[in-house]
């Protein structure tokens, strides 16, 4: 193939990739609104529709990620466009797996579908889909380890936060006798709080090893394990907040609402680490070794 034919082929494939991505966004959007409808029609089948649409969306999303991996001949998370897509996909896959515990409870799906939808829209509207060669800093054996571990922890933290928010909102309602039509009972609402805790117990070591592998990668790429780069600093802040959350959960006086606040704060710090700190660093002109990911 000539260079012109290769460019035409790549443009053709990117066009169909974007169309598939927009189809995925539409399915996630319909799922999100179906979850919202479930709030007002708790006894209807809107929750089942929402979960079905979310499952269909993640199925097409899996096809998109496989296509992207084959076409780019590299892991599908080397640019922010790809990372946002991977983040949304992994969050939904984690939620669908965990939600099997509550076949008739759909409320946490509102938050997960909303977060995934926002990530996909951000990727499509503000980022280019072009497949680019790996940057020199990414050409390391630590690249896949670091990113996969980090995103596994991120996905777990998204679902944990969704369960925690559901717990905080529904618990006072159930105490007033509101919410039983959603498949929830006062005696089992604590399961959301407990599941959020167990998810962080699983995700925290992943985040820890993600930071450690990132330090090893930094030493290989830049000759030092830690440089107090903005992203490194915020990853440490995120790790500290989740460590405080785990500590609070083993203290009877802090279980419940106080610990839940730490969990949600940890999620906010995670989002700041993922996208916020790079955006601020670029906006404020702060030097960062991670600006290649923007």
Image: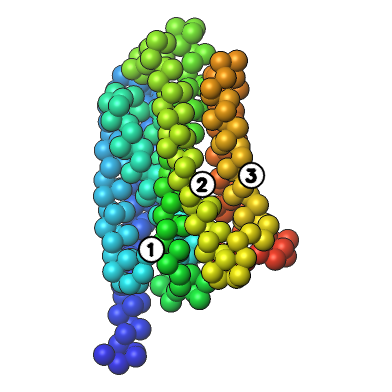
- Picture residue at 63% right of the left edge, 44% below the top: 237
Q: Residue 247 versus residue 269: which sits nearer the camera?
A: 247
Q: Position of residue 121 (x, y in %)?
A: 46, 53
Crowding at dot 1, Cα within 10 Å, few <14 / some 14-19 / many 20+, comes out as many
SS assignment at label 2: helix
| Residue shown at the point (45%, 45%) measured from the top left | 206
Task: Say which quarter of the image contains residue 145.
Answer: bottom left
Residue 114 visible:
no
Q: Is residue 33 above or below residue 143?
A: above
Residue under label 3, please give it.
Answer: 237
Element class at badge 1: loop
**Of pointers 1 and 2, the one earlier in the residue sequence:** 1
Residue located at (60% from left, 15% from top):
253
Residue pointed to by mark 2: 208
Q: Position of residue 212 (x, y in %)?
A: 52, 53
Residue 109 left/right relative to 253:
left
Q: Few, some or many C-alpha atoms within 10 Å of disc 2 (few <14, some 14-19, many ≥20)?
A: some
Q: Is residue 73 above or below residue 40?
A: below
Label 3 vs label 2, nearer the camera: 2
Viewer-proximal residue among 264 and 197: 197
- Mark 1–mark 2 distance (CA, rounded to whole Å): 22 Å
Q: CA distance from mark 3 to mark 1?
A: 27 Å
Q: How is the image coloured?
A: rainbow
Which corner quadrant of the image does residue 102 belong to? top left
The residue that label 1 is drawn on is 76
Q: Secondary structure at mark 3?
A: helix
Quadrant of the snapshot with the C terminus:
bottom right
The residue at the point 32 percent across, 31 percent down is 99
Which sits earlier in the primary sequence, circle 3 or circle 1?
Answer: 1
């Amino acid at each position: 193939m000539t260079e012109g034919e290769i460019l035409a082929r790549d443009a053709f494939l990117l066009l169909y990739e974007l169309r598939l991505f927009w189809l995925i966004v539409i399915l996630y959007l319909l799922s999100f609104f179906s979850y919202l409808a479930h709030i007002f029609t708790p006894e209807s089948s809107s929750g089942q529709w929402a979960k079905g649409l979310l499952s269909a969306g993640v199925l097409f999303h899996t096809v998109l990620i496989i296509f992207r991996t084959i076409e780019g001949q590299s892991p599908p998370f080397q640019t922010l466009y790809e990372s946002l897509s991977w983040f949304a996909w992994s969050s939904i896959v984690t939620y669908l797996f965990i939600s099997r515990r509550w076949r008739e409870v759909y409320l946490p799906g509102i938050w997960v579908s909303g977060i995934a939808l926002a990530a996909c829209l951000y990727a499509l509207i503000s980022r280019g889909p072009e497949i680019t060669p790996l940057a020199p800093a990414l050409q390391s054996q630590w690249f896949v380890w670091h990113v996969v571990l980090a995103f596994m922890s991120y996905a777990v933290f998204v679902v944990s936060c969704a369960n925690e928010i559901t717990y905080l909102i529904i618990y006072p309602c159930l105490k007033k006798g509101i919410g039983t039509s959603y498949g929830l009972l006062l005696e089992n609402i604590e399961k959301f709080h407990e599941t959020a805790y167990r998810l962080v117990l699983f995700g925290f070591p992943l985040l820890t090893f993600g930071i450690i592998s990132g330090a090893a990668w930094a030493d290989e790429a830049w000759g030092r394990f830690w440089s107090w780069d903005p992203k490194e600093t915020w990853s440490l802040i995120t790790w500290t907040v989740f460590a405080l959350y785990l500590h609070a959960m083993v203290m009877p006086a802090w279980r419940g609402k106080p610990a839940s606040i730490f969990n949600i704060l940890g999620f906010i710090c995670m989002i700041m680490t993922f996208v916020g700190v790079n955006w601020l660093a670029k906006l404020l002109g702060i030097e960062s070794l991670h600006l290649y990911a923007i």
